[in-house]
Amino acid sequence: MNILKHLIYPPIFMNDDKLRKHFANKWIVITGASSGIGEALTLRLIGVQANLYLIARNEEKLMALCHKAKNNGCKADYCAIDLRQRNQLATLCSRLREQLPSVSYLFCNAGKSINRTILDSIDRMHDFDRTMDLNYRSAVALSLALIPALKRAKGKIVYTSSVSSLYPTFPGWSAYHSSKCAANIWFKTARKEFNKLLVKVQIAYMPLVHTPMSDKNKRYRNLPAYSADEGACILLRLAMSNRFSYKPWWAFGV
Ligand SMILES: NC(=O)c1ccc[n+]([C@@H]2O[C@H](COP(=O)([O-])OP(=O)(O)OC[C@H]3O[C@@H](n4cnc5c(N)ncnc54)[C@H](OP(=O)(O)O)[C@@H]3O)[C@@H](O)[C@H]2O)c1
């Protein structure tokens, strides 16, 4: 199992000095900061004195992370919000515009997956609305709100997508994959349009990562996968590079 894990998920190393050089004292906005990949990303950035604005629903978790950040010499703030609620999201966008005049990185990482066939969703239109509102719409809204601040800092937007959105369609994943594919197209287009603003856009086509989200699915729980910290390192390495996207090596060509 270990050999298989190393082959499919080669270890990801991270040099803290390099991280510090890139991220220390810069303002970084992270959605989905309360758990899994986003929480691991937050902890890595706290370790190198980045300034953080954290977004998710779990207020207790965000508050604790902000406390830890401030104790470590970072500036930090948070907003506990359900990103699917359009009014709350609009208020957050206005607040961010006022509060953060310059943002170096926006990590659009909050997400939810749903595994349910279309035929089992006949009375569940809300599944499609919720995945679209979170995985696509909120990422677009926050990117639009932060364009001026990102432009000022010559900043970057990093979207956490899924490698599965690059593969042929698979029964049960219509809601999740549709929302991730919509975001893929939006961010690929934004990449071209924002070039002239000197704002870079990047997509991480993430493979399986053990997090509370993926581990809910019994089939994934015992499969080899990256850890949440390795997932965070994938995002950080991408953000430090000039590449447009990250894909695991075995997904090249798709
Ligand atoms: N894990 C994998 O195998 C995998 C693979 C490919 C892509 N991804 C992507 O990676 C990203 C992070 O997922 P994860 O695996 O780290 O899952 P996770 O541990 O469940 O974290 C998801 C994050 O999104 C936040 N979130 C969920 N619903 C929200 C809502 N309605 N409003 C605001 N925030 C919300 C959660 O915070 P609250 O619950 O506090 O709101 C949490 O911080 C997602 O975009 C996911 O699609 C994951």
Image (cartoon, grey):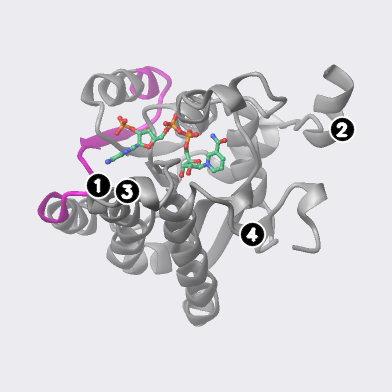
Secondary structure under the numbered disc 3 in the rendered image? helix
Q: Secondary structure at mark 4?
A: helix
Alpha carbon of mark 1 to alpha carbon of mark 4: how far? 25 Å
Q: Nearer the viewer, mark 4 or mark 2?
A: 4
Start and end of the magenta stretch?
A: 68-88
In the image, residue 143 lies at what x, y percent? 36, 62
Of badges 2 and 3, nearer the viewer stands: 3
Q: Residue at x 59, y 58 (%)?
A: 169
How many marks do you count on the picture?
4
Type of the residue with mark 1: Leu
Separation of marks 4 and 2 at Cα, in angstroms: 20 Å
Q: Is mark 2 within 8 Å of ligand 1?
A: no
Q: Badge 4: few (under 14), some or many (20 or more) residues near its Cα, within 10 Å? A: some
Give the amino acid at mark 3.
Ser
Which of the two discs, 4 and 2, labels the residue nearer the N terminus? 2
**Distance of mark 1 from mark 3, alpha carbons?**
22 Å
Of the residues tagged 1 and 4, which is closer to the observer?
4
Mark 4: which amino acid? Leu
Q: Residue 13 appears in which quarter of the rendering?
A: top right
* Residue carrying label 1: 83
Q: Give the Cα distance between marks 2 and 1.
A: 36 Å
